[in-house]
Amino acid sequence: MSGRDLFCQPRRVRHGAALTLVFASVLVAGAATGSFGETAARTPSAEPAAPAGHGDAVTEAAARAMADGKSPMEAAERAVSRSGDRWSAVYSQGEYQEFQEALDGQYTGVGLSARRERDGRIEVTHVQPGSPAAVAGIRGGDRLRSVDGEDVDGRPVTEVVSLLRGDTDGASAGTRVRLGLERGTHTWSEVLRRARLSTDSVTVRRLAGGATLIKIAAFTKGSGDLVRNAVDHAPEGAGIVLDLRGNSGGLVTEAVTAASAFLDGGLVATYDVNGDQRALHAEPGGDTTRPLVALVDGGTMSAAELLTGALQDRGRAVVVGTRTFGKGSIQMPSRLPDGSVAELTVGHYRTPSGHKVDGRGITPDLEAGDEVLERAETVLSGLGDAP
C-alpha cells in the first residue's frame, strides 16, 4: 500500500454510533469521489441505493432537531443509519470545506509519498519538488522511522499520512513536525514546517520505446486540461499509455475533459438522479488516431472508471490490467441547518454501451498483473503496425 500526505484528511463518515475514517484520494480504496455539477459520486458501494425519498427524511430530521435545540448533524447521522443507505455520509462544515479544497488540488503537508514494505518499514517513494521535504534534502528511498516521536514501523500508511498532516491536532500550514529518518546506515531527524501545496495529479514521461505515459493520480481541478496538453505535446504518431491505476476518482467534469482529449465529441456516460436520466458528452476535436492503451487495476474507481468505460466502449483504447473496483453510485450533498453536509445516494452511472459499473467494475481487454506496462507497450506496437 502506498500514499502521500495529500487528499488524506480523514473524513468522518458516521453511521449511528459508528465512526469510520474514509480517505478521499489515491491512498486507499476509500472514498472515491466525483462531481456531476452539484452531484457527487463518492464512496465505493456494491449495494443498491437507499429507497427514493430517504434524503428528505434526513433533511427533515435535521430541521426538526434544529427547531428543538438539538444537533442537526447528530439527527442526520441517525436518519442516515436508519435509511439503509450504507454509503451515505455526514460531514461537519470544516471537514467538507477541507475536502472541497483537496478537490481544488490543494493540501496541507510536507510533500512526501510513502509506502509500507513487507517488513513493516515505511519508505519514502516520492518527494514533491519545492516542498518542505524537498528543501530538507529528503529523497525517495529514505526510510521514515518516526513522526513527532511516534514510531511508524508497522503502521498503516493512512495513519502515517495522518501524522504527517497533523490531522488529529488540527495542524495548519506553518506548524512544525519532526521526522525521524534513515538512509543506509545514517539516521537523523528533520524538523519541517507544513505548507499549503499543490497536488501532482497528472505526471508525464517518455517510455523507452518512445510512447508517452500519462499518469492521472486523481481528477482534481485542472487535471483534464493537463491531460489534453500532454496529448497535444506528445511526439507525432507516438502511442500513449494512460495510467489510471490507483486512481480513486475525483471531479467527473475533469474526467470528461480528459475523455475529450481522445474523442471527437459523443457520449461519455449516462447517469440518473432520482430517476431523471442525464448524459455526459465529450467536446469535439480530440485525437482519435493516436494508439492508446489505458492501464487499470482494483484501485481504479468512480470517475476513473467512467473514463475507462467511455474509451473502451467506443473502441478508442485497449484496456490492460485487472478488473476495476466497481464504484458507480452517485451521492448528492445537502446542506444542513448547522452548516454540516449530508451526502446521500441518488443514482448510478453507466458506460456508453449501457454497462452498469457499480458492484461490477470494468473488465480489461487484456489481463495483466506485474508486467502490465510491458504488455501495454507490446499492444501499442501492434496498434501502430495496424493498417
Image (spheres, rainbow, N blue to C red):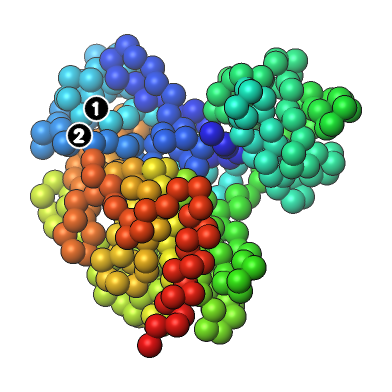
Query: Which class describes the residues within 10 Å of circle 2: few (<14), some (14-19), or many (20+)?
Result: few
Name the residue at the bottom extreme.
387
Q: Residue at x 69, y 33 (%)?
A: 123
Whole-percent x and y of residue 126? 69, 44
Measure the C-alpha gap from mark 2 to mark 1. 8 Å
Q: Is residue 17 left or right of residue 251?
A: left
Whole-percent x and y of residue 272? 17, 52
User: Toward the viewer: 192 or 121?
Assistant: 121
User: Toward the viewer: 345 or 342?
Assistant: 345
Q: Residue at x 34, y 14 (%)?
A: 18
Instruction: Check if mark 2's residue and mark 1's residue have beta carbons within 8 Å.
Output: yes
- Tell me if I can see residue 136 in this picture: yes
User: Toward the viewer: 44 or 71?
Assistant: 44
Q: Is residue 223 above or below residue 83?
A: below
Q: What's the residue type where badge 1 is placed?
A: Arg
Q: Is residue 232 left or right of residue 91?
A: right
Q: What's the residue type where badge 2 is placed?
A: Glu
- Residue behind mark 2: 47
User: Toward the viewer: 315 or 178?
Assistant: 315
Q: Earlier in the sequence, mark 2 or mark 1?
A: 2
Residue 86 disc label: 1
Q: Residue at x 48, y 41 (%)?
A: 25
Which of the 4 image quarters holds residue 261? bottom left
What SS does tag 2 mark?
Answer: loop
What SS does tag 1 mark?
Answer: loop
